[in-house]
């Protein structure tokens, strides 16, 4: 009897499963069809550039080496006019113009000297043609690299796509190409940090009503605080800063500790992954032996000390030599100038602090009720404006001092 009941239970359960299986299959197949239709509507790789319609982004794979006139037969040159890209040609022309002598006399050399004395207003390489075209780039192609760069990189319609770093490097050079590679990498790495920061802010919004500190501040109507200034500032209650306590909790709550730890880890991860990304770019662009911080001798310095040369023990090439006494005097003047600018910055910071202390009482005794009732806000606002003006003025002063110290040996 028990065996018969078990067999009937098995048959019923099997029939139930067989009965519901076609319904489930039909339901899942409908969902798959809807998802497939939605995927057909979406582009397959929306963030990648379409290299089929933009064939100029493709580059031929070949071995590269530093150019040498003696080994010109080893290079594949289809057209001498286009063998060097525009960025390399512009750097070559700029290198020549910086070192050519335009007039007989001491230090009459270089394009920068002509710009300094006002002979020329500006000097910069020209772009190759217009960046706009009447015809579509997908049907007629790009007229030049500038037009191609504008359509696939500098247009608002492609803000979500990856950068054409190879094209940026070809048009602007390796340094600017590496800069935009770093900028794109940094922007992409900011997304997880922004997401965690938004989570911390939302956590502060959700726990605002449960914050014990802001509750105590808002309910402390009997606690009297000392006035901000001596004469004109009145006493105030602790509950007057209730709004400030709540706003502070939005950005400084329990989740802020997790955000601080996350940002410490994020900074390390960002730096290490950027090193890997930079190594990949350096390998693809043949920049393994390229030094990013390689300093080039200033043309004016080279012209002044070109008569005194000595052999560099590392490179084995002759280079301009500067006497030790001359070098020490320039170092002393430069160090004194830098120390003076540091003192100016410290004095400006102390001046802003003293201004805020003195101005609170002045605004508290002001005739206008709007300023008198908001003396702290007025003090902070004017201090910020003055600080901004000081920063801009010091920025101009820094440029003048840096140019003066650089051209000290002319």
Image (spheres, helix red, strand yellow):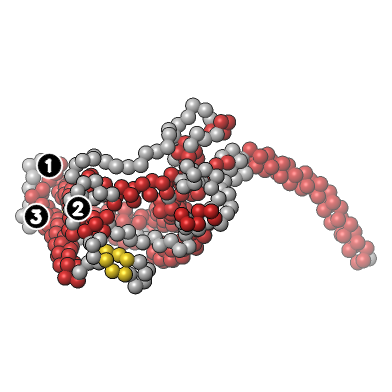
Closer to the N terminus: mark 1 or mark 3? 3
Mark 1 closeness class: few <14, some 14–19, many ≥20 residues within 10 Å? few
CB of mark 2 within 8 Å of CB of mark 1?
no
Q: Position of residue 381 (x, y in %)?
A: 19, 48
Q: Quadrant of residue 117?
A: top left
Query: In which quadrant is the N terminus drawn?
Result: bottom right
Q: Measured from the top left, where is residue 399 in percent x and y?
A: 21, 52
The residues bearing labels 1 and 3 have C-alpha atoms spaced at a distance of 19 Å
Q: Which residue is mark 3?
A: 358
| Mark 3 closeness class: few <14, some 14–19, many ≥20 residues within 10 Å | few
Residue drawn where x is 48% and y is 62% of the image: 288
Q: Residue furthest left?
A: 231
| Residue at the extreme top of the image, as rendered | 134
Query: Which residue occupies 90% across, 59% down?
Result: 8
Q: Upstream in the sequence, badge 2 or badge 1?
A: 2
Residue 220 seen: no
């Amino acid at each position: 009897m028990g065996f018969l009941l078990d067999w009937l239970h098995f048959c019923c359960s099997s029939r139930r499963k067989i009965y519901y299986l076609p319904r489930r299959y039909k339901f899942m197949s409908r969902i798959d069809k809807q998802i497939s239709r939605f995927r057909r509507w979406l582009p397959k790789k929306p963030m990648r550039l379409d290299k089929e319609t933009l064939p100029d982004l493709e580059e031929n794979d070949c071995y590269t080496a530093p150019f040498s006139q003696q080994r010109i037969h080893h290079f594949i040159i289809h057209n001498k006019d286009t063998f060097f890209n525009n960025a390399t040609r512009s750097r070559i022309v700029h290198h020549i113009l910086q070192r050519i002598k335009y007039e007989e006399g001491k230090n009459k050399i270089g394009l920068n000297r002509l710009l300094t004395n006002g002979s020329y207003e500006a000097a910069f390489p020209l772009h190759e043609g217009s960046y706009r075209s009447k015809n579509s780039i997908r049907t007629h192609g790009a007229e030049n690299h500038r037009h191609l760069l504008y359509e696939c990189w500098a247009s608002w319609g492609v803000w979500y796509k990856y950068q054409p770093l190879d094209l940026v490097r070809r048009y602007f050079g390796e340094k600017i190409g590496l800069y935009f590679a770093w900028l794109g990498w940094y922007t992409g790495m900011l997304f997880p940090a922004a997401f965690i920061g938004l989570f911390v802010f939302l956590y502060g919004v959700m726990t605002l009503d449960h914050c014990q500190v802001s509750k105590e501040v808002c309910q402390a109507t009997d606690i009297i605080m000392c006035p901000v200034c001596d004469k004109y500032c009145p006493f105030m209650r602790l509950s007057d800063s209730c709004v400030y306590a709540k706003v502070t909790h939005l950005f400084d709550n329990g989740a802020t500790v997790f955000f601080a730890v996350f940002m410490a880890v994020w900074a390390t991860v960002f730096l290490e992954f950027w090193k890997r990304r930079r190594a990949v770019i350096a390998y693809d662009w043949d920049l393994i032996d390229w030094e990013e911080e390689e300093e080039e001798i200033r043309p004016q310095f080279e012209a002044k000390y070109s008569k005194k040369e000595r052999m560099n023990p590392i490179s084995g090439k002759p280079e301009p030599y500067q006497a030790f006494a001359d070098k020490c005097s320039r170092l002393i003047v430069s160090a004194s100038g830098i120390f003076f600018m540091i003192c100016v910055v410290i004095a400006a910071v102390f001046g802003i602090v003293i201004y805020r202390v003195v101005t609170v009482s002045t605004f508290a005794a002001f005739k206008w009720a709007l300023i008198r009732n908001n003396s702290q806000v007025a003090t902070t606002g004017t201090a910020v404006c003055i600080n901004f003006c000081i920063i801009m003025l010091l920025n101009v002063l820094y440029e003048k001092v840096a140019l003066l110290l650089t051209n000290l040996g002319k």
